[in-house]
Image (cartoon, coloured by chain):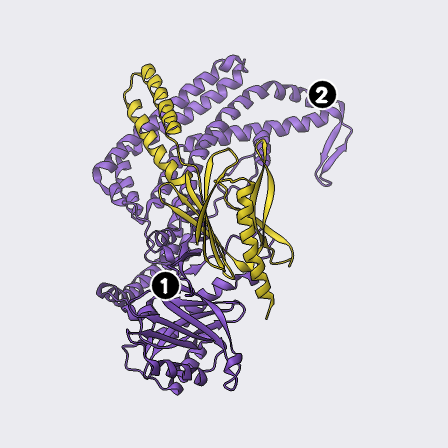
């Protein structure tokens, strides 16, 4: 049976002593965590191990002896080490040996049957696996993607092996607290012996972080308390807040800031603060709005004529066309009235863009919504008109066939109408049918325009969602400290001499970027449209109004 | 202990199988794929540049030519780094696991390690590949729910695609080690 001994690379140059670690019988592997140096008192070593075992719930014991020989072999040391096997009894007992200055290691693992019959003890083959203790301590092992038919509550039994090694090292923090340079009763060698990690700046930052975080937490709690006060919940303020996507973003940002202070998604927002840029933006807005209004007027003139060769009902055409033209005229006058103030308003609004790119994008989305407000109004008028027409048509069609909609029973019942009812009903039916193409055309045109605006806003929202859910910290960790996120391990066979045990180097295999994104994706705002394609088409056909960005669970207007 | 043999892949290209035996319980197979030939490289470059010249005579814009050069360079770099596999290695360690490494032409290596506890068996399977029927070596993984079931099939040497004679060599050595591992794991 081949036994596996996981040996930390930092202890390869340590002086002779005892090996301390955990024995995993199911995998026949021994995980060495530290080396205890001479001189030591066995009672104190046992006490320390009992303490560590209690603190970390890991079965830490003495596994064997470690001998780092100088040029001349010391026989007394050899006998002494063998005698230790009697004091700290452990099955199997490992004896690792290395010649100083050379790469040849030797390893024996014996199972004592008892001091009376040493001849009956069997020796097993040992495989040495070196691992970097600091990296394995900090790393987090990600199991492979679960199969679809595996239940979520299954803890895989086959996750033994490597997961046990990682788990053992990670949980034995208590053992790594004292070092061989400390003045304690027992001197240990582990990864901290290579040099305790410390940097003046890091220490100072840690000291300063406490009060700074406290101050920021107080400020943020004040702000959220202010925003949660009752004044803002009254109608119409609450209505406006819910319609503007900027407020949604601000709320989301406030939540994020309260949670973690360092998550600033700053993509150089200072660009937006330059005065000439704001001025240019403001100067560009008015001609754009004018251009849009002009295009709409052309469109209406076209509809009032003979659009695409279709013949419209003249009177209705003129009425609708003139109504919409007047509406556009009002809108243009309003824009021209506001034009001197636009620049200043934009500058103040742009201040809030210091909270990140997502807020700036949401502001853009809201500006688009406000500029195309007249398109929204036209869509509503056209849709309501069309909806009324369709309902009237369907009701009169039922009358035509002698049926009626029973509101009480929610079904279609037959009904006997009088002659004059039938007469007027038929007349109205024919009138509506002949006016249908005109209304339908206006409805179609304005619905398409509205859908175009909704698509643009939707794309902006998708982009905002993407930026919000990007796990920047995990990606940065994967880039700079790839050993922290482990998908598995990889082995490399080191120089091998016949007669010596097999030596392997275990390195951490980092997680691929696609899995990092998939595992650590942040929760999004949840702006998913609640309609399926089928219900959307149905609503469009019947002229019902579409509210595209309503969340699921909001109450309907 | 090292030895090298020559085989061929399913398309007729030359493969070299290097076998290294570190110890009775540790074995490594290295299969090197056919290299990128000068002929194919020249053919691709000429096609791209002829197309670019054709577009240039139509549009009279010299940016097309510079763009073609960039595209060729970036395409070649991307191909070497992401697509072209130089050699594939299989390392079997008794009672530890099986490791597959693919080394790309630019030096990048991608490694997968499967623990021995998850391996059910290593078998040679038949598959229909385009218009051919080919043999491939694969690892069967255990199903945690069902003791004798199989949850996943992991194919080996996917870009080298050796023929049956090469696969039989690898298969025999793998089975030796797996049998030894099963024998020793059942004993207390």
Q: Where residue A248 sits in the image (x, y, percent)?
A: 41, 48
Few, some or many residues within 10 Å of mark 2 (<14, 14–19, 20+)? few
Color used for chain B? Answer: yellow
> Residue A98 appears at what percent x and percent y?
35, 70
Residue wearing tag 2 = A423
Mark 2 or 1: the one toward you? 1
Q: Are marks 2 and 1 in contact (CB under 8 Å)?
A: no
Judging depth in this view, the residue of A498 and A494 nearest the camera is A498
In the rendered view, does A494 fall on the left or right side of B188? left
- Position of A217 compared to A451: left or right? left
Q: Say if A467 sits above or below A312 in the image.
A: below
- The tint chain A carries is purple
The local secondary structure at tag 2 comes to: helix
Along the polypeptide, which appears first: circle 2 or circle 1?
1
User: Could you say which disc has been placed on residue A132 in the image?
Assistant: 1
Q: From this viewpoint, is residue A337 visible?
A: yes
From the viewer's perspective, is residue A3 above or below residue A49?
Answer: above
């Amino acid at each position: 049976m081949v036994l596996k001994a996981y040996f930390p690379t930092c202890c390869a140059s340590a002086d002779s002593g005892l090996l301390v670690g955990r024995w995993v019988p199911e995998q026949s592997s021994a995980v060495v965590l530290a080396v205890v140096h001479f001189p030591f008192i066995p009672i104190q070593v046992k006490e320390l191990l009992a303490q560590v075992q209690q603190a970390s719930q890991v079965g830490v014991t003495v596994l064997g002896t470690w001998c780092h020989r100088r040029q001349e072999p010391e026989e007394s040391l050899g006998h002494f080490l063998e005698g230790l096997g009697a004091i700290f009894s452990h099955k199997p007992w490992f004896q690792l040996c290395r010649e100083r200055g050379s790469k040849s290691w030797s390893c024996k693992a014996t199972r004592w049957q008892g001091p009376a019959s040493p001849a009956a003890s069997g020796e097993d083959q040992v495989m040495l696996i070196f691992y970097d203790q600091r990296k394995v301590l900090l790393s987090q092992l990600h199991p492979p993607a679960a199969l679809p038919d595996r239940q979520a509550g299954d803890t895989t039994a086959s996750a033994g092996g490597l997961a046990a090694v990682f788990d053992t090292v990670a949980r034995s923090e208590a053992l790594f607290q004292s070092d061989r340079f400390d003045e304690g009763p027992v001197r240990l060698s582990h990864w901290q012996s290579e040099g305790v990690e410390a940097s003046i700046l890091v220490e100072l930052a840690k000291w300063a972080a406490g009060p700074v975080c406290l101050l920021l937490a107080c400020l943020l709690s004040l702000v959220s308390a202010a925003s949660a006060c009752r004044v803002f919940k009254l109608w119409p303020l609450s209505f406006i807040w819910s319609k503007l996507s900027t407020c949604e973003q601000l709320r989301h940002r406030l939540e994020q800031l309260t949670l973690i202070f360092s998550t600033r998604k700053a993509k150089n927002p200072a660009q937006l603060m330059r005065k000439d840029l704001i001025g240019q933006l403001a100067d560009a807005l008015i001609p754009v709005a004018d251009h849009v209004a002009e295009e709409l007027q052309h469109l209406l003139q076209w509809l009032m004529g003979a659009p695409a060769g279709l013949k419209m009902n003249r009177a209705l055409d003129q009425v609708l066309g003139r109504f919409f033209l007047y509406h556009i005229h009002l809108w243009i006058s309003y824009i021209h009235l506001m034009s001197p103030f636009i620049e200043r308003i934009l500058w103040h609004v742009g201040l809030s863009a210091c909270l990140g790119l997502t807020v700036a994008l949401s502001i853009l989305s809201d500006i688009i919504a406000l500029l195309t407000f007249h398109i929204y109004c036209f869509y509503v008028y056209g849709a309501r008109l069309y909806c009324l027409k369709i309902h009237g048509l369907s009701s009169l069609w039922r009358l035509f066939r002698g049926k009626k909609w029973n509101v009480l029973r929610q079904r279609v019942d037959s009904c006997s109408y009088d002659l004059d009812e039938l007469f007027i009903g038929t007349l109205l039916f024919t009138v509506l049918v002949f006016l249908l193409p005109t209304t339908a055309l206006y409805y179609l045109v304005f619905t398409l325009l509205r859908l175009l605006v909704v698509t643009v806003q939707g794309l902006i929202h998708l982009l905002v969602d993407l930026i919000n859910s990007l796990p920047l910290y995990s990606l940065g960790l994967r880039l700079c400290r790839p050993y922290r996120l482990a998908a598995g391990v990889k082995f490399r066979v080191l120089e091998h001499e016949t007669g010596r045990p097999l030596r392997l180097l275990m390195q951490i295999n980092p997680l691929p970027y696609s899995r990092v994104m998939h595992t650590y994706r942040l929760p999004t705002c949840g702006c998913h449209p609640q309609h399926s394609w089928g219900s959307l088409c149905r609503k469009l056909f019947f002229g019902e109004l579409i509210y595209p960005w309503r969340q699921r669970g909001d109450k309907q207007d | 202990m090292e030895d090298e043999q020559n085989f061929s892949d399913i398309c007729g290209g030359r493969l070299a199988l290097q076998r290294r035996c570190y110890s009775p319980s540790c074995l490594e197979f290295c299969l090197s794929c056919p290299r990128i030939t000068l002929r194919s490289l020249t053919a691709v470059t000429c096609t791209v540049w002829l197309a670019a010249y054709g577009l240039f005579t139509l549009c009279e814009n010299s940016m097309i030519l510079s763009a073609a050069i960039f595209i060729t360079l970036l395409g070649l770099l991307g191909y070497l780094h992401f697509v072209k596999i130089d050699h594939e290695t299989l390392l079997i360690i008794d009672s530890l696991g099986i490791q597959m490494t693919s080394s790309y032409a630019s030096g990048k290596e991608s490694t997968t390690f499967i623990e021995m506890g998850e391996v059910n068996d290593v078998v040679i399977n038949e598959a229909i590949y385009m218009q051919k029927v080919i043999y491939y070596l694969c690892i069967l993984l255990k199903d945690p729910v069902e003791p004798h079931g199989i949850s996943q099939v992991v194919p080996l040497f996917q870009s080298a695609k050796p023929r049956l004679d090469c696969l039989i060599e690898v298969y025999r050595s793998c089975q030796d080690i797996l049998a030894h591992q099963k024998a020793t794991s059942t004993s207390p």
